[in-house]
Image (cartoon, rainbow, N blue to C red):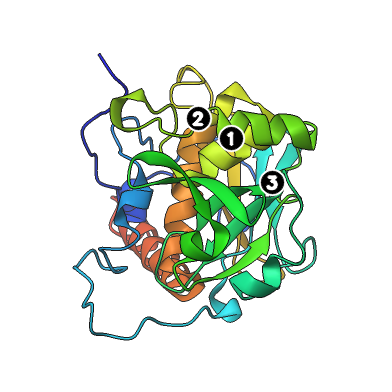
């Protein structure tokens, strides 16, 4: 058996029990995010699908990256913050691929972003080149080619794990070039790139057993005072959900959450004995 599995579509928030929308944990009721045990690499969708799942029109101009649609969030393993993306905690400025090359050092993680697309991650290995997971294959490409016209940034500090040395990061990446399809150990470009830099087995497919309490919490910042939290049994599942949110964008995610909250309130009002 290989690692390739059948697709399981994402459940809507109306079907997923979650944590209090204000970000306050309670001990009552189930608190679980979506499990992606049967999902494929979501980077497969980057070039061929829009946010609503329909095929892209090759003649239609792509939307430019809009920083206002960035989904700010943090990830916790139990009580430890292991990832944070917010304007307060990180430099989220993006650059053209040509300008980013002047800033990159071997071993850096690079993220390519565009509105309505999954973010695409890569490892900069020097000589203007990156290694990245694209279309179910690990490839060594020029950074400008891998960008496909998208804006990009260095994202070394989003994950809070201790990084390996630059030489080891590059070695991890280069040793995987050419691996594809059923041989792959990662579902998406982010999991691969992060593994190269941090060496955590939890970033690989099946790196953790999904049993018991959900130790990972994805905290989505809805405003300065409000957040929404989902819990997951594995880092892999959490990354899939985080990337789905990045794909949708802030406006769509907040709309989805609002629909979920309304559905929950309506269900409560329809319960027997409700005032």
Dot 2: element: loop
Measured as percent of width and height from the top left, residue 177 is found at: 48, 34
Q: Which residue is mark 1?
A: 173
Residue 94 at least partly seen: no
**Which residue of the protein is positioned furthest toward the top in this rendering?**
1
**Of the pair 77 and 267, the residue shown nearer to us:** 77
Cα distance in 3D space between marks 1 and 2: 6 Å
| Residue 62 figure quarter | bottom left
- 1 and 2 marks in contact (CB < 8 Å): yes
Measured as percent of width and height from the top left, residue 30 is found at: 45, 34
Q: In the rendered view of the protein, which quadrant contains the N terminus?
A: top left
Measured as percent of width and height from the top left, residue 205 is found at: 44, 26
Q: Earlier in the sequence, mark 3 or mark 1?
A: 3
Dot 3 alpha-carbon crowd within 10 angstroms: few under 14, some 14 to 19, many 20 or more: some
Q: Which residue is mark 3?
A: 83
Q: Which residue is mark 2?
A: 176
Dot 1: element: helix
256 is higher (above) or lower (below) than 238: below
| Residue 63 figure quarter | bottom left
**Of the pair 60 and 89, the residue shown nearer to us:** 60
Horizontal side of 91 relative to 134 (left or right) equals: right
Cα distance in 3D space between marks 3 and 1: 21 Å
Which residue is painted at 21% across and 33% down in the image? Answer: 6
106 is higher (above) or lower (below) than 192: below
Horizontal side of 266 relative to 20 (left or right) equals: left
Measured as percent of width and height from the top left, residue 87 is found at: 74, 69
**Of the pair 38 and 98, the residue shown nearer to us:** 98
- 3 and 1 marks in contact (CB < 8 Å): no
Which residue is painted at 31% across and 63% down in the image? Answer: 47
């Amino acid at each position: 058996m290989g690692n390739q599995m059948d697709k399981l579509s994402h459940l809507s928030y109306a079907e997923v029990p979650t944590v209090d929308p204000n970000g306050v944990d309670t001990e009552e009721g189930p608190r679980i995010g979506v499990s992606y045990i049967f999902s494929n690499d979501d980077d497969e969708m980057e070039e061929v699908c829009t946010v609503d799942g329909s095929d892209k029109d090759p003649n239609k101009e792509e939307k430019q990256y809009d920083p206002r649609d960035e989904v700010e969030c943090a990830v916790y393993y139990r009580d430890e913050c292991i990832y944070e993306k917010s304007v307060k905690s990180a430099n989220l400025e993006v650059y053209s691929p040509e300008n980013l090359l002047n800033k990159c050092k071997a071993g850096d993680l690079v993220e390519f972003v565009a509105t309505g697309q999954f973010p695409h991650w890569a490892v900069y290995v020097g000589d203007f080149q990156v290694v990245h997971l694209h279309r179910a294959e690990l490839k060594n490409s020029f950074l400008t080619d891998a960008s496909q016209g998208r804006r990009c940034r260095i994202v070394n500090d989003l994950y809070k794990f201790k990084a390996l040395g630059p030489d080891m990061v590059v070695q991890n990446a280069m040793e995987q070039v050419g691996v594809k399809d059923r041989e792959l150990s990662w579902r998406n470009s982010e999991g691969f790139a992060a593994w190269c830099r941090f060496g955590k087995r939890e970033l690989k497919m099946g790196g953790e057993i999904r049993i018991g309490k959900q130790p990972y919490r994805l905290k989505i910042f809805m405003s300065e005072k409000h957040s929404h939290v989902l819990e997951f049994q594995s880092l892999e599942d959490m990354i899939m959900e985080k990337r789905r949110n990045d794909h949708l964008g802030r406006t769509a995610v907040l709309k989805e959450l609002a629909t979920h909250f309304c559905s929950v309130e309506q269900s409560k009002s329809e319960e027997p004995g409700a005032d």
